[in-house]
Each structure stands twice: as structure tokens, then as C-alpha cells.
């Protein structure tokens, strides 16, 4: 009976929120849809300026919503990825990540994320063909990549490369073709949709090529043209490791007509990378995806939008997490040092990397999948020397009430760094391995924005201004110096040419610091 009453109450409830402004006593009502209310509603809540208000608070122009770091702000309606952080759930277009990782492939998941449904065999074959055929770069790109220093960070190269790539395709640039180049796709324009899809094929296909070129320029090796007849991750590994046209390996097949076969990446590594790419393909509105949409809202070409996303992912709070795990494990050294390290974490003297997540409050569902992948990779490569330390840290943290009570469980970054290290990737290449699959998620969100029936509005958030009120300009000779750390430029120590020129000019530019 109680259940029936509750059910009826739920059916008959009014989905709205009533707000009483205690400043004026006025009452406002706003509708609730999808458990959210429209933020512009608050602009209708106005009040005369009070004793504590400044003119810059603009009280009479309506209430503003302040949300530092977007902790509880929804900026778009999406049907791509769903995350339930409290219960450790991640779904792409409704499909659980566990099922996709065990039964699908990266390019199949790419089709799903971008177009909204699982493809048929024919649809998948056409999609794979179009993506892989667009992996080849223009020959001039070799000069672009070689213009970077040998020790340039691969993410700096890759970020620049995405923007550079857009310079080849004038037909993809709204600044040249008209600002509705992509937004008219929302009206079903077949030519516009075809143009959009071509850029999607190019960006997914060339993501591995750009990443491989960024890798090989660091090693002073010639670049490799993407092969035919290989999967997406096989092609990527081939471009990283292929040495020459005569690059062959002995074959173990006794019936083979030749004792050698062309080089092909190890199937376990290619399969592991495919699963890792699935897990990293999308993660709702994370920092880089939001950056892509923020940039995309001004209607540039998708190459520029993805370059911005790449720069966002470059940051250590986003794409550098798995690298931080490896550095942490190296600093711990051995399993016997784990207790002392965890004690230092509790004293806030050390940072525990690879545990906890901004979204997941229980466990990261990807971490269970990736743990199995790690075992498969270690079976081929041999266990990483850091593995015993990682396992000791893993087990100790999960048994410690301090970390359990704070819901600090291992996340996907804890294991992915160990896998990449075991596969032989340098640590500064880890973020690149994050970018390549995330290109798909970025494109899915960008395409969804362009296809919005309501059109695209430029993202222009508000701010709470707390600076000085209006004040008169002070002539140069009448000003009092404002000094102190952060209130004036720092004193920079110069050396070399600047130091010598400063001596001629009669300026003291600090102590010479020789680079010899």
C-alpha cells in the first residue's frame, strides 16, 4: 500500500522549484527537467542594492550562479556518455564499458560514440576503410615535424600538428567557407554532412600518424607511411617501430614458402592497446572535451578545436596522471617503503597518484578491465620492476581505513602507466597515448554540438568581479609604488647576450649564470 501511495505521489508531483528571495520576500517558481533547472532563470531574481552590495555586483540586473571549477554546472544536453560516479558506472551510448571492452573494437566504439549506434558489418567495414585510408600525411609534413628540436615534448609537437593539419583543408574551414559550414548539418544538408564526415575520417585516421611522427622525430628516424591490411592499433605500432623496407622477422610456420615474414606488431600488444583506446575514447565533459566545445562554439574548423583540446589534456592535472603514478612508484622504490610513503600521504607530505577520481566516488569501472589487460601484457613483456611496489601500494591502500573512508580506490591511471612502461613507451609519451583515442570523444561531442537543432551559441560564461571600483587615472609622476610578491614583475636573472648588453646600457641584470 505504501509503495502504491509513493508511486501515485511520484506521478502527481509538480516538477518545479520554488525560490523565496529573502532580500525582497518575492517568490519565484522554475520548472525542473531532467533534474536540472535553467541557470538563466536566476536573472529574473532581482533586488535593490543593499548595504553590502557594490555597484559591480549588479544586484538589480539579476542573480548570478557562481560555480568555481564547474562542480555542478551542466552546459549541454548530451546523449553520448553516461557516468554514475557513486556506483562506478560508465556507458557509451547506453552500452556498459565492460561489454564494449570485452566484445567490441576501438573503431567500432568510435562509430558508436560518433553516430549513436553499433554498426552493422557492412557499416563497420566502410567506416574502418575510410578511417584507415585517411591515415597518410602530405609529404610536406615531414619538414614540419623536423622543425622541432630533438628534445621537444611530444605533446607540444602533437598540439601544434593538429592546428597545422587544418591548414591543408580550406574546405573544412568556416572562416573561408561561411560560418554555417557545419551548423547546416543540423538541417540534414547532405553535402555539409559529407564534408563533416570527411574531416572526422581524417582526424581519426591521422591521429596515429601524427603521434607516430612525434615519436620518431625524437629518435631521429625516418617517418613511416601507414601500412595497409592492419588494424588501427597494429598500424599505430607499425608506424612507431618499423625500420626499413627489408624489415622482416623469422616465421615459425613450417609450411611457409619463406623463412621470413614482413614485420607486424605483437598481437597481444596491439589487442591491449585497442582495449586501452576503448577505455580512453570518451569520459563525458572532462577538461579537454569541454575545451573542444568551448573553442568549437566560436565555429572554427575542427582541427583548431582539437588542437585546443590537446593543449588542455597536456596539463598534468588531466593527461599526466598516469605519468605521475610511475614517478610516484619510482620515488617509493620498493615494497618495504610503502608503509612510510602512505604515512607521509596522511600527513599531506606526499601525493597519492592513481587513486580516487573527481567523478567516481566508489571505484573506477575501467580499473578492473585494465588490470586484466595488465596481466596479459606482463605475460608477454615480463613483469615491470615496479609491479611489486605497485601491488604492495594497491593492497595496503585498499586495507587502510584512511583511504577506504575517503573512497580512494585505484583508477584507470594506476594501471595504464605500468602497461605503457612495460610496452616500452617513454613517460612523456603517455599523454600522447591518451590523446589518440580521445580524438574520437572530442569529435563526438563537437559533432553533437554542430547538429544541435537549437543552433550553436558561443560559450561566454560570466564572472564575479571583485576588483577595484571606478577610480581616476593617476599621472605617472604622482603615483606611489605598489610593491610586493605578485604585485610587480619578478626580478629575472639574465645571462649571456642579455647580460652583456645590459652592462653596456648601464643596467644591473643580475649574476651571470653560465650555460657552459
Image: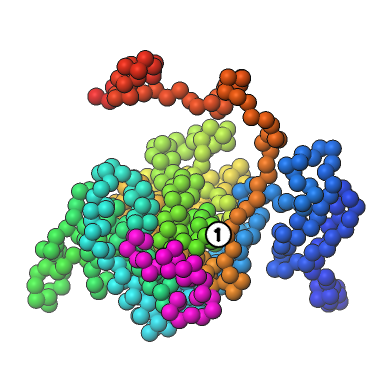
Q: Which quadrant of the rendered structure holds the N terminus?
A: bottom right
Identify whether 480 is placed above or below 220.
above
399 horizontally vs 65: left or right: left
Foreground residue, 11 or 194?
194
**Percent x, y of residue 174:** 45, 66
Identify whether 147 is placed above or below 251.
above
Residue 490 visible in the picture: yes
SS class of the residue under badge 1? loop
Main SS of the magenta part reads helix
Residue found at x 40% / y 41%: 327
Residue found at x 32% / y 47%: 426
- Is residue 67 shown in magenta? no
Residue ID for mark 1: 285
**Percent x, y of residue 187:** 54, 79
Task: State which quadrant residue 258 falls in.
Answer: bottom left
Q: Residues within 10 Å of mark 1 (few under 14, many from 20)?
A: some
Residue found at x 34% / y 60%: 167
Which residues, given as a range, are shown in magenta? 165-193
Residue furthest to the right: 25
Residue found at x 61% / y 21%: 479
Amino acid at each position: 500500500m505504501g509503495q502504491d501511495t509513493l508511486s501515485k505521489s511520484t506521478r502527481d508531483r509538480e516538477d518545479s522549484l520554488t525560490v523565496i528571495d529573502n532580500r525582497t520576500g518575492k517568490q519565484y517558481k522554475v520548472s525542473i527537467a531532467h533534474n536540472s533547472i535553467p541557470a538563466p532563470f536566476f536573472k529574473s531574481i532581482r533586488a535593490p542594492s543593499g548595504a553590502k552590495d557594490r555597484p559591480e555586483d549588479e544586484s538589480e540586473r539579476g542573480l548570478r550562479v557562481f560555480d568555481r571549477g564547474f562542480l555542478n554546472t551542466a552546459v549541454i544536453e548530451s546523449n553520448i556518455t553516461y557516468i554514475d560516479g557513486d556506483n562506478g558506472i560508465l556507458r557509451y551510448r547506453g552500452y556498459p564499458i565492460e561489454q564494449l571492452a570485452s566484445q567490441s573494437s576501438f573503431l567500432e566504439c568510435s562509430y558508436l560514440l560518433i553516430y549513436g549506434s553499433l554498426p552493422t558489418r557492412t557499416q563497420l567495414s566502410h567506416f574502418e576503410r575510410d578511417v584507415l585510408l585517411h591515415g597518410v600525411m602530405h609529404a610536406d609534413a615531414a619538414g614540419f615535424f623536423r622543425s622541432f628540436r630533438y628534445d621537444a615534448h611530444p605533446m607540444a609537437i602533437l598540439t601544434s600538428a593538429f592546428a597545422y593539419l587544418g591548414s591543408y583543408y580550406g574546405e573544412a574551414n568556416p572562416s573561408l567557407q561561411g560560418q554555417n559550414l557545419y551548423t547546416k548539418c543540423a538541417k540534414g544538408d547532405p553535402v555539409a554532412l559529407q564534408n563533416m564526415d570527411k574531416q572526422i575520417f581524417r582526424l581519426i585516421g591521422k591521429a596515429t600518424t601524427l603521434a607516430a611522427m612525434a615519436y620518431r622525430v625524437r629518435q631521429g628516424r625516418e617517418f613511416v607511411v601507414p601500412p595497409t591490411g592492419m588494424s588501427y592499433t597494429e598500424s599505430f605500432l607499425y608506424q612507431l617501430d618499423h625500420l626499413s623496407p627489408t624489415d622482416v622477422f623469422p616465421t615459425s610456420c613450417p609450411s611457409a614458402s619463406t623463412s621470413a615474414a614482413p614485420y607486424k606488431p605483437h598481437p597481444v600488444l596491439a589487442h591491449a592497446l585497442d582495449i586501452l583506446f576503448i577505455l580512453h575514447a570518451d569520459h563525458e565533459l572532462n577538461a579537454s572535451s569541454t575545451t573542444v566545445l568551448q573553442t568549437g562554439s566560436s565555429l572554427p574548423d575542427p582541427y583548431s578545436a582539437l588542437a585546443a583540446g590537446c593543449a588542455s589534456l597536456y596539463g598534468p592535472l588531466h593527461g599526466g596522471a598516469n605519468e605521475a603514478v610511475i614517478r610516484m612508484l619510482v620515488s617509493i622504490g620498493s615494497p618495504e617503503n610503502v608503509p612510510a610513503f602512505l604515512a607521509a600521504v596522511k600527513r599531506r607530505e606526499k601525493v597519492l597518484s592513481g587513486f580516487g577520481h573527481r567523478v567516481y566516488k566508489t571505484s573506477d569501472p575501467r580499473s578492473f578491465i585494465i588490470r586484466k589487460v595488465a596481466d596479459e601484457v606482463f605475460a608477454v613483456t615480463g613483469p615491470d620492476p615496479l609491479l611489486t611496489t605497485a601491488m604492495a601500494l594497491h593492497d595496503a591502500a585498499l586495507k587502510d581505513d584512511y583511504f577506504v573512508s575517503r573512497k580512494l580506490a585505484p583508477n584507470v591511471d594506476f594501471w595504464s602507466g605500468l602497461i605503457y612502461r612495460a610496452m616500452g613507451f617513454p613517460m612523456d609519451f603517455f599523454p600522447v597515448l591518451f590523446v589518440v583515442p580521445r580524438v574520437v570523444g572530442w569529435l563526438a561531442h563537437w559533432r553533437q554540438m554542430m547538429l544541435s537543432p537549437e543552433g550553436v551559441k558561443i560559450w561566454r560564461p560570466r564572472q564575479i568581479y571583485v576588483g577595484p571600483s571606478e577610480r581616476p587615472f593617476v599621472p605617472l609622476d604622482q603615483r606611489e609604488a605598489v610593491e610586493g610578491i605578485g604585485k610587480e614583475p619578478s626580478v629575472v636573472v639574465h645571462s649571456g647576450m642579455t647580460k652583456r648588453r645590459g652592462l653596456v646600457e648601464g643596467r644591473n641584470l643580475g649574476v651571470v649564470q653560465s650555460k657552459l
